[in-house]
Image (cartoon, rainbow, N blue to C red):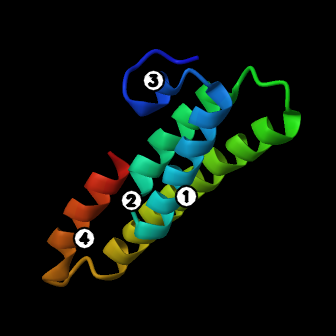
Amino acid sequence: MPAGSGIPAEACDPELSATALRGLAVQCVDLGYRAEAVQLGEACVDYGRNLDSPRAVACYEATLANAAEEHLHHALDMRVRLRRYSGSPEAQELRERAARVAG
């Protein structure tokens, strides 16, 4: 079980913690909080790593993979738009947003 505090650590039940974190990661993806979704997905995988259910572990790993894919796709999309509008006044705003997403 990963080190840390908060509700997942207090649950003392790795599967419950991983499932709750998975739900939060999915919500973050849906709401556009991609970097946070990746962090929650990583924590989800950490909590579920030693479970006896390969199906559950695969589900948690798929959640992390989906969050990472969304995060990367968004960052690449920002860079493409930045190149497309590099001569426009919107370019600086896009550069700043791309840096926040990638960083």
Q: Quadrant of residue 101?
A: bottom left
Residue bearing mark 2? 33
Please report whichever mark, 2 or 4, sits nearer to the chain's N-terminal start.
Answer: 2
Give the CA distance from mark 1 to mark 2: 10 Å
State left or right for residue 46 relative to residue 88: right
Give the CA distance from mark 3 to mark 1: 21 Å
Name the disc covering residue 10, or none: 3
Please report whichever mark, 4 or 1, sits nearer to the chain's N-terminal start.
Answer: 1
Closer to the eye: label 2 or 4: 2
Which one is in front, 43 or 38?
43
Residue bearing mark 4? 94
Helix, strand or loop status at disc 3: helix
Closer to the eye: label 4 or 3: 3
Residue bearing mark 1? 26
Please report whichever mark, 3 or 2, sits nearer to the chain's N-terminal start.
Answer: 3
Q: Give the crowd class for mark 4: few <14, some 14-19, many >=20 residues within 10 Å.
A: some
